[in-house]
Amino acid sequence: MELIRQNRKTIVITVNENGEVIIKAPYFIPDSKIYSFLNEKQSWIFKQQQKIRNRINVINSYDFVNYVYVNGQKYDWKEVKQGKRKSKATFYTQEFNKNVIKRAEKWGILFEKKILFKLCNSKCIWGSCNAKNIIKLNWKMILLPIELQDYIIVHELCHTKQLNHSTKFWEEVAHLLPNYKILRNKLKEYSFLLKTDVL
Ligand SMILES: [Zn+2]
């Protein structure tokens, strides 16, 4: 636990990526006040730490040297390669086109308009959609379980109707994926993949 005294009006508690608790408090507030605030927030802190532990468990369950991951399943890279001089980048691109793009096109039929899907390579986003109905999907989506790929696809497709995150937009998403909130939260556990070198 780390207590930082600074020029501020309120106490704020955060849990960092290692699960450590950081408290920022005004200079002149007594310790007892800080501790009672900390007590009040105890269950929230535990919840945050549990989330971080889960996330770390997910990260540690991957081995990007010896395995490749397709649709959330792991495959021995040596077996997949079978002596062929294929790079992981080529493998993932092919699988992405075979799986993600194919399913995106299927979902796209429901929207009854011309939509173009493109592969993208970004360290911070899974997908994007512009006003010309060009949807860019991150190639790393191929690593995700299918239900999360579907969430990203449907999310971006719904932007062809609503180019924002309004209530109307989320209604469109819910119409196709009633459990989208669960999926949206689950996707957060995988966001580390965007910044991880998996090749
Ligand atoms: Zn969006």
Image (cartoon, grey):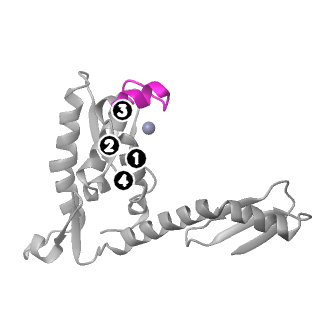
Q: CA separation, marks 4 and 3?
A: 24 Å
User: Quick one: SS at disc 4?
Assistant: loop
Taking the magenta stretch, the answer to whether it contains residue 198 is no
State the residue position of label 4.
121
Farthest residue to the top: give it.
112
Q: Residue at 32% of width from left, 68% of height from top?
A: 198
Q: Around disc 4, counting alpha carbons within 10 Å, would you say few (fewer than 14), some (14 to 19), or many (20 or more)? A: some
- Kindly indicate whether the residue at mark 1 contacts the one at mark 2 (C-beta within 8 angstroms): yes
State the residue position of label 1.
184
The disc at residue 173 is: 3
Which mark sits nearer the N-terminus, 4 or 3? 4
Amino acid tagged 4:
Asn
Amino acid tagged 3:
Val
Which mark sits nearer the N-terminus, 4 or 1? 4
Specify whether tag 4 is near ligand 1 (CB below 8 Å). no
Farthest residue to the right: give it.
28
Taking the magenta stretch, the answer to whether it contains residue 169 is yes
Res 134 visible: no
List x then y, in percent, for residue 5. 83, 68
Q: CA separation, marks 3 and 1?
A: 11 Å
Specify whether tag 1 is near ligand 1 (CB below 8 Å). no
Q: Is residue 172 toward the left or the right of residue 75 in the image?
A: right
Q: CA separation, marks 3 and 2?
A: 8 Å
Q: Is residue 130 toward the left or the right of residue 9 in the image?
A: left
Which mark sits nearer the N-terminus, 2 or 1? 2
Q: Residue at 83% of width from left, 64% of height from top?
A: 33
User: Quick one: SS at disc 1?
Assistant: helix
Over which residues does the magenta segment extend?
159-174
Q: CA separation, marks 4 and 1?
A: 20 Å
